[in-house]
Amino acid sequence: MGRVVRSARPAHGSPPHFLRAPPGTPAGAPHRPGLPGRSLPTRKEAQMTSAPRTTGELPDAPADRTLPQLLARNARDYPELPGLSWRPADGNGDWTKLTWAEIHEHTERLAAGYAALGVGRGDHVLLMMANRPEHWLSDLALVRLGAIPVSVYGTAAPEQITHIARNCRARVAVVEGTAQVEVWEPLLSDADTPLGRLVVAEAGAEGSHFPYAALLREPVPEQFAKELDAARPDDPLTVVYTSGTTGEPKGVVLTHRQVMANALALDAVVELPPHVEHICYLPFAHIAERMLGIYLPCHRVSHVYLCADPTGVGEVVRKVRPAQFFGVPRIWEKLCAAVRAVLSLMPAEQRAVIDEASAVAREHVGYRERGETPPAELEERYARARQAVLLPLLAAGGLDRVTWAASASAPMPVDVVNFWAGFGIVIMDAWGLTETTGVATTNSPRTGFRLGSVGRPVESVEVRLAEDGEIEVRGSSVFSGYLQTDGSVRSALDADGWLATGDIGRTDEDGYLWLTDRKKEMIITSTGKNVSPALVENALKEHPLIGQALVHGDGRSYLVALLVLDAEAAPAWAAANGVEADGGLAGLARHPAVRAEAERAVAAANSRLNRTEQVKRYELLAEEWGPATGELTPSLKMRRRVIRDKYADALSGLYQD
């Protein structure tokens, strides 16, 4: 087929921080609240029960470890370290915190409650809740029980929910509140769906259904506790359903061993402080948040901050000031637009100082990207610029402590990467699929990076390119197969273990992978030319006025585009340029000055594209696309078919003379 790209190796062999001797118990007694309506044991009781009943050591081979074994290790060796924090669902009020000892005890009580409902080893349980403690703790409790948690996107359509419920044959679903009950209730009487019980998290919303608070069992029968945590490395840990951008969601079966392989591979290329904080705001139905927000924190003994409302993530970032931050490209684009909007309103002399500091930062990043040591003189200039100019700006947004910034899920616009490099933040773009347990390739400050690429393979996978450029992968973190309705697992691998990913890419002479597009999304014009829509769309979005773009032209002689004004940057651009318009973004979209600037943005993008890739006509829109209106998946990837159907008349009109 094509050339195989071998895994990148760490620069040195020091053990990860979580395998070193545990630190001493922190001074001061931590706050020990329980979930709303319940209380956890007193300090004396917690000390009596904090050591998990599973007291055996972890297997010598890290890949043989299971999630329950990691939880037991955390409760035994790090009982006082915080593991989970959250605020009330409305985002107001104080933070509640659980230590790893409390998490272990609490999930045991929850597991007993689920067992009393009839949930047993191998049973699938559906979870549709925001990033709230009931979701996170239930996930771990079910795994300890030997059941298989399956998270469902909160924005999933009723027909998708029905498909998932029938496919995994779950008999129990845990939902958030009244709105979710209304969607799920019809399935209880659906003859083709085995669902028989709803558990409702919000107090007062359960009606005739089972209240979540009643799950907690105290005390837990001793014999039951002894039978917990019996998972084996090759047992299913979860089923993650694909987001359905090109058809019905498919259930990706992932085992403990595959998750551990991915976790170990990531630790070989990422350097983080011990017990690092993680802000958990992406849906748990997305493989990225399952790894970053559940599995890696158990592996690394991290501290998870739950953010139930993704629109409030900025406030949480400012409070936590995390050392790591992951965002899909749309998140980084929106942050970039917000910062640019603020910068555009600053006095010219202040902006000039910031621009000069950003130029120094980009020069410094350039040396690092090439694997070269920056000259001493540049190091001094960068240290001064960072301390005096860049860090105060980053501190205002809570990003001044970030040592690892990352993105994945879709191609990252190069101008956005360069913008953040100007603040000394290098976004380590990665690539992977649900089927690869998340990250398969990544850039790394330890093993090297190339801005604009998605890095090199992690240790748990091999990557090769087929003749048509399709990326293929195999390895220890590649999935078992797709769940079938009869409970079997259908493999999607070829005879040699390779998975065809559907993504198109290329590799450079240093082994870095560069994404081109999705194979199914490639545009083939009427002249037979192949065009990557993502390439053209990212070129269009380089202008701050344009927040979103969709390129269309399959079977046509030329390309057209739908352009969406950026909700943050467009008003700022208008204010900076003396443009006044009534009616918000819709008024701006009609204003001649804005339309003229959009024309210049398209012309600038076309100047960097070949003739086939250039956009001949476009429509300027004011309504931002999102998951709630259906144009984006919950992970903020475009649903191209939905957008094309919604704007079919507009797209057709762009081809009329």
Image: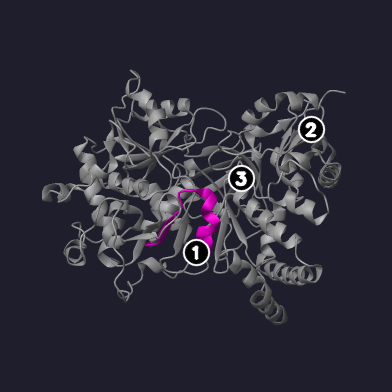
Magenta segment range?
A: 301-318
Foreground residue among 81 and 234: 81
Question: Per the image, is 459 magenta?
Answer: no
What separation in Å lies between label 2 and label 3 (alpha carbons)?
A: 21 Å
Question: Which residue does the image show at 47% across and 62% down from the upper left?
Answer: 268
Q: Say which mark, if any, is on residue 559.
A: 2
Residue 311 drawn in magenta: yes
Three-letter amino acid code at disc 2? Leu
Q: Residue at point 42% right, 35% down?
A: 481
**Foreground label between 3 and 1:** 1
As drawn, is 228 to the left or to the right of 354? left
**Kind of element beneath mark 2:** strand
Disc 1 crowd, CA 10 A, few/some/many (<14, 14-19, 20+): few
Residue 13 locus on image (x, y percent): 45, 69
Q: Amino acid at mark 1?
A: Lys
Name the mark nearer the viewer: 1 or 2: 1
Q: Foreground residue, 1 or 284?
A: 284
Q: Is residue 278 above or below residue 37?
A: below
Sequence-first tag of 3 and 1: 1
